[in-house]
Image (tube, rainbow, N blue to C red):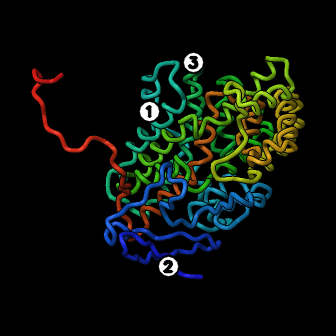
Amino acid sequence: MSDSATLRFNNKETQLPVLTGSEGERGINIEKLRSQTGLITYDDGFGNTGSCASAITFIDGERGILRYRGYPIEELAEKSSFIEVAWLLIHGELPTEAQLRGFSGLLTEFQVLHEDMKYHFEGFPPNAHPMAILSSMINASGCYVRELTGPYDPRKFERHSARLISQVRTIAAFAYRKSRGLPIIYPKPEYKYTANFLHMMFSMPYADLDLDAAAVEALDQIFLLHADHEQNCSTSTVRMVASSRANLFASTAAGVCALWGPLHGGANQAVLEMLEKIRAAGDDGSRFIEAAKSGDGSHRLMGFGHRVYKNYDPRARIIRERCEAVLARIHRSDPLLDIAKKLEETALKDDYFLQRKLYPNVDFYSGIIMRALNIPVEMFTVMFAIGRMPGWIANFREVMDDPKGKIYRPRQIYTGSTERHYIPLGERK
């Protein structure tokens, strides 16, 4: 197979190198295209553009494959934990016992916010969206780390990344308490990561939350399944901001803003709203499916299909099983789950959806689990952000450690007015 591609333009041929990834995917290297031909490429939405070379996550959307650092997501979901996977993504290998113990120790060390940050929370209105608070407070938290104001120091990266992973859940829990007018609950050093988050969310000063193992395991797995997903909108944003040499906290705060968009992080909330709409209409999902197939814009089937996956989202298979197990173990039935299963069963047998490769994605079930855990809808995207933090950090590190790194600066095809000249105000029509 040729290791270059030939571009013919204006009777001139240009050879462009072809790169091959470790899993066999191939891409044309156009770094020198403009200098050699005067041309740029145009790819609206970047659907066919490789913005970087990365060793973190591999996705094969046609075959429904997702691997973190080479490890199948199915194996990690069965055998690992969110914190172990966080180390894997950031450092490239599964941790030894000593490394995991040290990392957990750092998470405990940094889990409490600077006390002055309480006053920042008080400055937000009661109805402030938790994602707005999360982004703002991540940046504010970085202000209390003096080293972040200087150049990137790889020797301090492990401590900074641990601080961020630990404090993002504290900020999220405090944001929830603020929105409910509830007193702040501080973390406990004896609790592990996810258990501590649920404690800060739902305990009261006079009574600690009775932590249910099934609930803790379910939320930990949601975090794990969302830990990274290649060059999506928010991860690309983190890399873009990092390329300017902005610090870790500023770069990931930008990622939170990108994730906040309803086309990115709000999909599981949209699924739950759809299921509620179906239930309120007295439908088991059958009528809704038919209306969706007819092209009725008010009956859009949420939680099906994916920009990358043209097969069953591997995370959806895992979380579907976890969803049923959680509801069974906490002895809670949910009519929305019955509707969701009906929609899935129907869609997976219907040629309309099969021909369009509209399979359930991870958002289809994650909202039901979080609903069962009493996490409010406005916090769903925050849960996504907590889970995605290790992936953002790993991508930040790749940008910073690249010896050939340069600031990201996409080109454009200009479609505005050609040159024209200023007209005095009195002469304009």
Of the 4 image quadrants, the one containing the N terminus is bottom right
Find numbered disc 1 in the image and state the secondary structure of the residue it sits on: helix
In the image, which disc is placed on residue 4? 2
Q: Amino acid at mark 2?
A: Ser
The first of marks 1 and 3 along the sequence is 1
Image marks 2 and 3: residues in contact by CB distance under 8 Å = no
Q: Which mark is residue 181?
A: 3
Q: Secondary structure at mark 2?
A: strand
Looking at the rendered structure, the secondary structure element under dot 3 is loop
Report if residue 209 is visible in the image: no
Residue 117, x across and y down, in percent: 44, 33
Percent of width and height locating residue 279: 81, 21
Nearest to N terminus: mark 2 or mark 3:
2
* Residue that badge 1 annotates: 117
Cα–Cα gap, marks 2 and 1: 55 Å
Q: Label 3: few (<14), some or many (≥20) within 10 Å? A: few
* Position of 10 relative to 293 (above/below): below
How far apart are the alpha carbons under marks 2 and 3? 62 Å
- In this view, the residue in front, 227 or 118, is 227
Q: Relative to 244, say whether 291 is above or below.
A: above
Q: Quadrant of residue 57?
A: bottom right
